[in-house]
Amino acid sequence: MNYFYDNLPKDIQYYIYEIRLKNAIKSCLNIINIKRSAILVIILSLKLEEKNENSSYYNPLKINTSILINKLKKYRFKYYDKMYVRMCLCLAEKGLAIYITSYNYLKNKTMTVNFIKTANACDLLNKELNDLKLPKTNIFKWKNLLQIK
């Protein structure tokens, strides 16, 4: 019990509550903006690989791709953020499909740790997108190519 606070008039108590609430809301909004800007920095730092003129993708063998997909998986989606999530997931899945169908993979059948991390992160993000009833992005069916079930 706070005797100083309890002895204040009600309007001053409400004013103090209002200030506390504003500060809490500001800190929550700042955290959301910091997370969004961190994700955008990662997106901008990733380089797009190109197979030909019409096909660009994120390289699934690089660790930054799996980090980006994992951060998107932890991020709470808003309406205006769907574009970033779908774009990044499509580019990562395209990279998975291109790597699986490439000559080196078919010849050696080797998968690196980063490739496996990226594949698992894409799979989990797709499940989360399906739970949120967002549009599916699994166009390239990379799991069918890899025959993982």
Image (cartoon, rainbow, N blue to C red):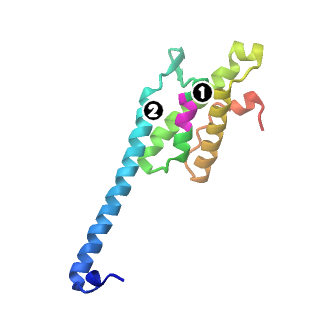
Q: Is residue 20 above or below residue 28?
A: below
Is 92 in the magenta?
A: no
- Residue 94: image tag: 1
Q: For the residue carrying disc 1, how many other residues have a C-alpha within 10 Å: few (<14), some (14-19), or many (20+)?
A: many
The one nearer the camera, 112 or 146, is: 112
- Residue 107: image tag: none
Image quarter for residue 3?
bottom left
Residue 146 position within the rendered picture, expressed as x and y whole percent measured from the top left? 75, 28
The amino acid type found where label 2 is placed reads Ile
Magenta region, main secondary structure: helix
Q: Secondary structure at mark 2?
A: helix
The one nearer the camera, 39 or 128, is: 39
Residue depicted at 69% across the width and 20% down the height? 101
> Quick check: 123 left or right of 92?
right
Q: Secondary structure at mark 1?
A: helix
Residue 55 position within the rendered picture, expressed as x and y whole percent measured from the top left? 54, 20
Residue depicted at 38% across the width and 40% down the height? 37
The amino acid type found where label 1 is placed reads Lys
Q: Which residue is mark 2?
A: 42
Q: Which circle, 2 or 1, is nearer the viewer?
A: 2
Is residue 87 visible in this depiction of the protein?
A: yes
Residue depicted at 51% across the width and 34% down the height? 88
Q: Is residue 75 above or below residue 2?
A: above
Q: Quadrant of the N terminus?
A: bottom left
Residue 27 position within the rendered picture, expressed as x and y whole percent measured from the top left? 35, 56
Residue depicted at 29% across the width and 73% down the height? 17
Image quarter for residue 122?
top right
Q: Which stretch did the figure color magenta?
A: 64-69
Q: For the residue carrying disc 2, how many other residues have a C-alpha within 10 Å: few (<14), some (14-19), or many (20+)?
A: some
Is residue 89 visible in this depiction of the protein?
A: no
